[in-house]
Amino acid sequence: MIDVKATLNNAEERMEMAAMFLDESLSRIRAGRANVAILDGVRVNSYGSMVPLNQVANVSCPDARTIAIRPWDKKAIRDIEKAIMDSDVGITPENNGEIIRLGIPQPTEERRKELVKQCNKIGEKAKVEVRNVRAEVKDKLKKAIKDGLSEDNEKDAEDELQKIHDKFIKKLDDLLAEKQKEIMTV
């Protein structure tokens, strides 16, 4: 017979993973302010292997419009610049021989709207995942009735599942609203 509590906890965990995915994905979207998280996806060719940028250089934000990258090995500057150019960051790096600087431009109104659309797409993926988890667990509960679970227990579990679902959808909406506010603030 199905363990209702364990099933609901599992569903909550999976929904939490969707929320974490959204939070992480939104942190990589450039909102006009310097944020080192936009470089998380950049991989640099270092001694023949592709490694994350933060493993070959110190990445910092000296001010709100600049990201400074100080390579530990000065010979890696060319590789780091190439990796940034090849990535989807969309910023041209400038270097002075020691430090690579990324100037974060102020996004135009049109670009901001595109970024909001991009955020909404990612948010919708996360919401779909939460809904899929809910549907999966609902099916499990329906099948559990045939295995001997009482209908009252199934209804209670379904209500609890809906509460968990609503909580996570609200959490996703809050994350999206916060990011949209950040993007649209000039």
Image (cartoon, grey):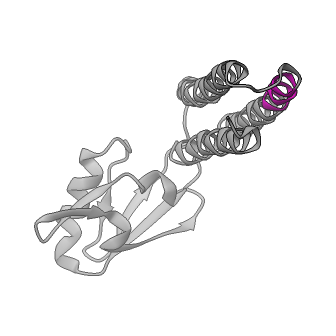
In the displayed structure, does residue 94 sit left or right of residue 48?
Answer: right
Quadrant of the image occupied by residue 59: bottom left
Q: As displayed, is residue 34 above or below residue 154?
A: below
- The image quadrant where one finds the N terminus is top right
Q: How many labels sit on residues? A: 0
Segment colored magenta:
153-162
Could you tell me if residue 179 is visible in this image? yes
Q: Residue 18, position in %: x, y?
A: 60, 39
Quadrant of the image occupied by residue 112: top right
The one nearer the camera, 115 or 50, is 50
- Magenta includes 158? yes
Could you tell me if residue 186 is visible in this image? no
In the displayed structure, does residue 101 sit left or right of residue 170?
Answer: left
The one nearer the camera, 129 or 179, is 129
- Magenta includes 101? no
Quadrant of the image occupied by residue 139: top right
Residue visible at 57% across and 23% down in the picture: 117
Residue visible at 54% across and 30% down in the picture: 122
Outermost front residue: 148
Residue visible at 55% across and 43% down in the picture: 21
The one nearer the camera, 132 or 35, is 132
Q: Residue 149, position in %: x, y?
A: 77, 27
Q: Residue 20, position in %: x, y?
A: 61, 47
Q: As displayed, is residue 5 above or below residue 49?
A: above
Q: Residue 97, position in %: x, y?
A: 24, 74
- The image quadrant where one finds the C terminus is top right
Q: As displayed, is residue 73 above or below residue 179?
A: below
In the displayed structure, does residue 155 sit left or right of residue 132?
Answer: right
Q: Main secondary structure of the magenta part?
A: helix
Residue visible at 65% across and 37% down in the picture: 183
